[in-house]
Image (spheres, grey):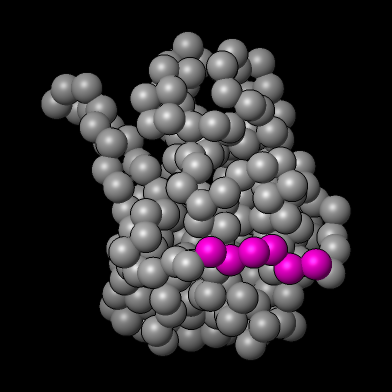
Amino acid sequence: MAFDNLAQCGAEQCSSYADNVLFSYSGTDITYAEAWVRIRAKARFLEKEGFRAGDVVGLLAENSPEWCFAFMAVTSIGCIVVPLDTGLPRERYDSMLNFVGAKAVFLSASFSDVQTSVRKFFVDDGAEPGDQPFSVPSLSLKSPAAYLFTSGTTGDPKVVTLTHGNVLHIATVCTSFEEYTEKDVTLAILPLFHLYALESSFLAPFLNVRSIVL
């Protein structure tokens, strides 16, 4: 299981296991094929809005398939995603987004009142399906994929950069340790903005063709 970047990973997994259920959410099943349609649509939306490789986009929302679609769409066009802690005081977010040079942020409805100087989109924006592919830039395992803020337990939060290779390697290691099969189901309880949850509750199951209950 070797991928060069998250865009390739998403396209190949969703094509190879098209009919498998990826997400069960609020009584609805979403297959791998359906997930890729929605990831592709959101990636095209970002391109039409002028976003290009290297741009930084925040992600502030509760666990949902849309959170995962946004994460994959942002990284697939070479932008850098910033998953934000949903438990912070609302006045913190603008300074965090500005610190990493974000140009926009995806929000869920419950965070629509967050005041920020960057462009705001909702996580379900760009949901209109279409057949047009998005443009995948030249991405390697060394290309940056995400900026994560540390918890700040011992001081001010620091920003950690994760490459496409970092993200894929951790997910691959998780799959080898967990020894799950395609028949197993993952219950995603932990918030996905945490690296541990992102890898073990979304990306590792995604690589191992498991269903995820959100």
How many callouts does the rendering have?
0
Q: Residue at x 25, y 28 (%)?
A: 157
Q: Position of residue 169 (x, y in %)?
A: 31, 71
Q: Is residue 185 above or below residue 195?
A: below
Please name the predominant secondary structure of the magenta segment in the image.
loop
Left or right, 128 with reference to 200: right
Image coordinates of residue 13 in percent, x first then y, are 58, 80
Farthest left residue in view: 154
Percent of width and height locating residue 213: 61, 61
**Residue 198's quadrant in the figure?**
bottom left
User: Could you say which quadrant of the image residue 82 lies in?
Assistant: top left
Looking at the image, residue 80 sits to the left or right of residue 63; the answer is left
From the viewer's perspective, is 117 left or right of 169?
right
Magenta residue check for 9:
no
- Residue 50 in the image, given as x and y percentages of width and height: 66, 42
Q: Residues in magenta?
A: 132-137
Relative to the observer, which residue lies in front, 158 or 213? Answer: 158
Residue 50, compared with residue 88, is above or below; it is below
Q: Quadrant of the C terminus?
A: bottom right
Q: Residue at x 32, y 81 (%)?
A: 176
Residue 4 in view of the camera:
yes
Taking 101 as reference, is 50 above or below it? below
What quarter of the picture does the N terminus occupy? Answer: bottom left
**Residue 133 shown in magenta:** yes
User: Could you tell me if residue 174 is visible in this image?
Assistant: no
The residue under the point 32% across, 53% down is 162
User: 55 or 42, which lies in front?
Assistant: 55
